[in-house]
Every structure is written in structure tokens, then in C-alpha cells.
Amino acid sequence: MKPLIAGNWKMNGLSASVQEVQKLIGLFSGSVPDDRDILICPPATLVGLFAAEFSDEGIAVGGQDCHANASGAHTGDVSAEMMADAGAAYIIVGHSERRADHAETDEAVRRKAQAVWRAGLTPIICVGETEAERRAGREKEIVGAQLSGSIPAGDDAYVIAYEPVWAIGTGLTPTPGDIAEMHAFIRSRVRDGVRILYGGSVKPSNAKEILAIANVHGALVGGASLKADDFYAIIKAA
Ligand code: PEP
């Protein structure tokens, strides 16, 4: 399976950040490799600008969230159709920060993933256990329930990102054995051809080891995707 290396910029970036992506392309000597998919999910304000600048340069652009409806009285929200119109190819749904900050349930995430399909795009559906859940040995139970509740019925394409909540932005990562075990579990629960990304403190120093683990088909990268040098090193490791 072709690896997907996705950058989640979260609430970071202004129009001047175009220069950071231009720097990334420059590090590839202007020719981004096509044997792996590269995706940047900037804040919604930058999706149109980045798509216009970079979609033809081998860097896909995605959204970080969307509303389940296509339009209507939802002040401050952005629909999947609007993301598609701006040039997005993917939309992240169910990131743990959205599940925590906006009380998003599996049902809400499933409806968002369905909206992404409706707009003709690919959802990246995030799942992952908290530290307390892992300590209690409940990680598969939690992730299994999130998979059952968050993946819509249907044949459209989707990507799963396994992101242990306790590994996001902390510098902590599960052991390679724990990642392998969880990815094998997720593999057994999703259909063939679905890419399963690992996310949580991926950085240049651990990317090669993580991306070599069985059933890891890429990475969802937060902090390290903001710096061209670091994101370049992670893409090269794939
Ligand atoms: C993320 O936010 O999806 C993420 C994995 O963040 P970080 O790489 O900073 O841990």
C-alpha cells in the first residue's frame, strides 16, 4: 500500500506559512516523490490558498474537521462541500482534540465521515485510547468501539489514524510492539485496502522505526509537520 504521510497543522499557520511548504518542496529539489502520498491539513482559512499553490506540486491539502450538514444555519462551521470547493482531498474527522474539546461522539464522527463521502472526499477517521484506558488494559475495547461507531456503512474509501491520546503532543510513543498489536487489531476490523496511519509524537528520530512496523501505512503528524525540515525527514523515512 502506498504510504500516506499527513500533517495536521491544528490551529497554526497564517498566509505567510506558504513559505514553509515551498521550503519543503525545495528540499525535494522541487520534485516531490509520487511513491508516497503527502498531505497537509492546515487550518480552514488556508485550505483554498494551499490547494491553489500546492495541489499540482504533489502535495494534497485536507481539512481538519467539517460539519455533518452541507449548508445551513451553523454559525462558524464549515461543510465538507466547502472544503471540497476550496480544493481539499481529505478531511480529518474525530481527532481526539475535537472529541475532547467539542464532546464529539462516535455517532457525530460517523455523520461527519459520511458528509466527507457525500462531498466526494476521503475521511481520515481518528481513534485512540486515553492513558487511563491503556493502563486499565482497555485499549482494544475502546478502539474497537470507536471503529464500530465512527466508520459509516458503505464502500467509499477511508483512512484510519490510530492516535493514542496520551502520545499526542507529549513526546511519548507506544512501544513498536504495542503499535504492531493495535494496528493488527485494527487491520482485522477494517476492510482490505484501508490505510492505517499511526499518529502521536512522530518525529524524524522515530519515524523510520514506526513506519517499518507491519500494518502501519503512514503517519499523521502534528507538531513536526509544521517545520519543513522535520516533515521532510519524516516523509523521507516512509
Ligand atoms: C496529531 O495532532 O494528530 C498529532 C499526532 O500530534 P503530534 O504529532 O504533535 O503528537
Image: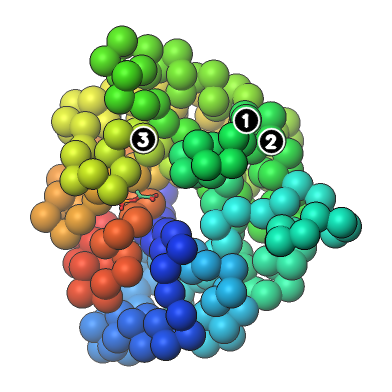
Q: Between 57 and 132, which is closer to the camera in this rendering?
A: 132
Report, in whole angstroms, how far the alpha carbon at label 2 lies from the one at label 1.
Answer: 5 Å
In percent of width and height, residue 194 lies at 51, 40
Q: Amino acid at mark 1?
A: Thr
Q: Is residue 77 left or right of residue 50?
A: right
Cβ atoms at labels 2 and 1 below 8 Å apart: yes
Cβ atoms at labels 3 and 2 below 8 Å apart: no
Q: Between 33 and 112, which is closer to the camera in this rendering?
A: 112
Q: Is residue 74 left or right of residue 204?
A: right
In percent of width and height, residue 27 lies at 24, 83
The residue lying at 49 percent from left, 68 percent from top is: 42
Q: Amino acid at mark 3?
A: Val
Secondary element type, mark 2: helix
Mark 2, residue position? 108
Q: Is mark 2 within 8 Å of ligand 1?
A: no
Q: Is residue 86 above or below residue 164?
A: below
Mark 1, residue position? 105
The residue lying at 80 percent from left, 55 percent from top is: 74
Q: Between 106 and 157, which is closer to the camera in this rendering?
A: 106
- Circle 3: is it few (<14), some (14-19), or many (20+) Cα within 10 Å? many
The residue lying at 33 percent from left, 82 percent from top is: 20
- Circle 1: is it few (<14), some (14-19), or many (20+) Cα within 10 Å? some
Q: Amino acid at mark 2?
A: Ala
Q: Is residue 118 left or right of residue 208?
A: right
Q: Is residue 166 visible?
A: yes
Cβ atoms at labels 1 and 3 below 8 Å apart: no
Q: Is residue 84 left or right of residue 9?
A: right
Q: Quadrant of residue 153?
A: top right
In percent of width and height, residue 26 lies at 28, 88
Q: If you read the primary sequence from the N terminus, does the residue marked by circle 1 or circle 3 appear first?
A: 1
* Total residue callouts: 3
Mark 3, residue position? 165
